[in-house]
Each structure stands twice: as structure tokens, then as C-alpha cells.
Image (cartoon, rainbow, N blue to C red):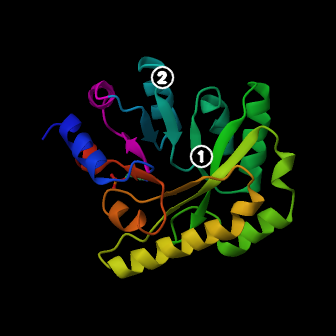
Amino acid sequence: MTIADRLKTLKETIPEEVTLVAVSKTKPASDIMEAYQTGHRDFGENRVQELQEKQGILPKDIRWHMIGHLQRNKVKYIIDFVHLIHGVDSARLLREIDKRAAASGRVVDCLLQVHIAEEETKFGFDEEELEQLFAGEPVKSFPNVRLRGLMGMATFTDDRVKVQREFRRLKSLYDTWASQMPEADTLSMGMSGDYDIAIPEGSNMIRVGSRIFGSRH
Ligand SMILES: *Cc1c(COP(=O)(O)O)cnc(C)c1O
């Protein structure tokens, strides 16, 4: 199957209200163009440099999602064009995004990344840190950041019950904290291997790479 076929098949199986972010990391611009030609506009990258390079050569109406870990000193490279930053995992990063967004005259949409997996290596707030964030400096004090919701990654495992439990927990955190984020409407969870679990658990944004573009090496 071609990229266009796989994208079409995938879109037919997900509800209309779920946004599909096509994760194009490591894939060439020609692959992105193949998806673009079908009318798809939301693409996700996890490295600043790669994102910057692709944005420079690809059509300007692409909505670029930064889905990876973002270092504070690299915010400036993507702030002018990024559509949604999924991986905000500290108040310091939030402050930097706010500062850079103000300088570029934008209000930038962001998701707070929450650590729900058992792996130690994944980034994100834990439950306590989320509480501290909302107890501390009010989100309102970042006028150039618009918090749209939460993002998370489940443990990489065949145990689908465990994955489901982790997504359920993220949804429950979303329900708890959405009231602190007046513009919250997005719960980003689910990838190639587990989006079918994430959607029934309340995801309305999935980030799918290999199922569309083929495996990465
Ligand atoms: C790579 C990546 C994805 C997509 O992974 P696939 O398994 O290829 O669908 C989704 N989210 C994040 C944060 C990623 O880094």
C-alpha cells in the first residue's frame, strides 16, 4: 500500500472528531508531500532541527506539531510557525515559550505532557508536579501561551489492559485539570500500536507515524 492508501484507510477507521497527526519524523519531504496531496495538513516531528528544515521547504499551510522533548534554548527556532507544542513538561519551558511567543507576536497552543508510562525515560509531569504547576504561578500569567490540554504516552508493551489503564488515568487527569485551562479541548494520546485503545478512552488527537509512513530504522 502507498502512504496515501494507508492514510485514507486509517482516517476511515477513526471518528471524525479525532485529529490525526501524521508523524513524519525521519521520513523524507517527499513522503510528507504524498500525504499532503491527499489533503492532509497535520504533521508531527520530534526534533527541532528536522522540523525547521522541513518547514522551510514544504507548503506553508502545513500545521506542524512539535511532539518531542523541547529544550528551552531551542524554542526560538520553531516559535514563529509551530501549530501545537505537545511536550511541555516544566513551568520553566512554559515561561520560555510565553516569552518567545510574545516576541514573535503570537499566542502559541501547547499541551502539558504527563508521564503515565512505567518507563523511567519518558518526559512529562507526574501527578504531583501537575498539582504544583496549577497551585503555583497561574496559567493566566502566561498570556502568550494557550494551554489546550494534555498529552501522554503509554508504556511500550503488549499488555493492552495496562495501556488502557494508563490512558484512563490520563483522561481522568484531563478531567481534573481542564477547569484550570480555560481553553482546554485536546487530549493527545495514542500512536500506531495503541490509538485503537486510546480513542475509546477519550483521546481526540492521535499521533501516528509508522502505520502511515512505514517503520523507521
Ligand atoms: C514517534 C512518535 C509517535 C509515533 O509513533 P508510531 O509508533 O510510529 O506511530 C507518536 N508520539 C510521539 C511522541 C513520538 O515520538
Query: The magenta stretch spans which residues?
Result: 18-38
Q: Quadrant of residue 25?
A: top left
187, 57: nearer the viewer: 187
Above or below, comparing residue 126 to residue 11 in the picture: below
Q: Residues within 10 Å of mark 2 (few under 14, many from 20)?
A: few
145, 174: nearer the viewer: 174
Side of 172 where 206 appears, left or right:
left
Q: Is residue 63 magenta?
A: no
Instruction: Work out which quarter of the rendered image holds the N terminus and state it.
Output: top left
Residue ID at (73%, 32%): 101
Residue ID at (64%, 46%): 110
Residue ID at (41%, 21%): 58
Q: Which mark is residue 24?
A: none
**Secondary structure beneath label 2:** loop
Residue ID at (53%, 37%): 48
Q: Is mark 1 within 8 Å of ligand 1?
A: no
From the top left corner, tell me how far across and down residue 126 is, in percent: 64, 71
Above or below, comparing residue 122 to residue 207 in the picture: below
113, 185: nearer the viewer: 185
The amino acid on which the numbered mark 2 sits, given as a three-letter code, is: Asp
Instruction: Say if residue 216 shows up in the picture.
Output: no
The answer for how far apart the CA atoms under marks 2 and 1 are is 23 Å
Of the two numbered discs 2 and 1 on the same chain, state the one appearing first in sequence: 2
Which residue is situated farthest in the left direction here? 1
Q: Residues within 10 Å of mark 1 (few under 14, many from 20)?
A: some
Q: Name the residue beneath numbered marker 2.
A: 61
Instruction: Say if residue 60 shows up in the picture.
Output: yes
Q: Name the residue beneath numbered marker 1.
A: 70
The amino acid on which the numbered mark 1 sits, given as a three-letter code, is: Leu
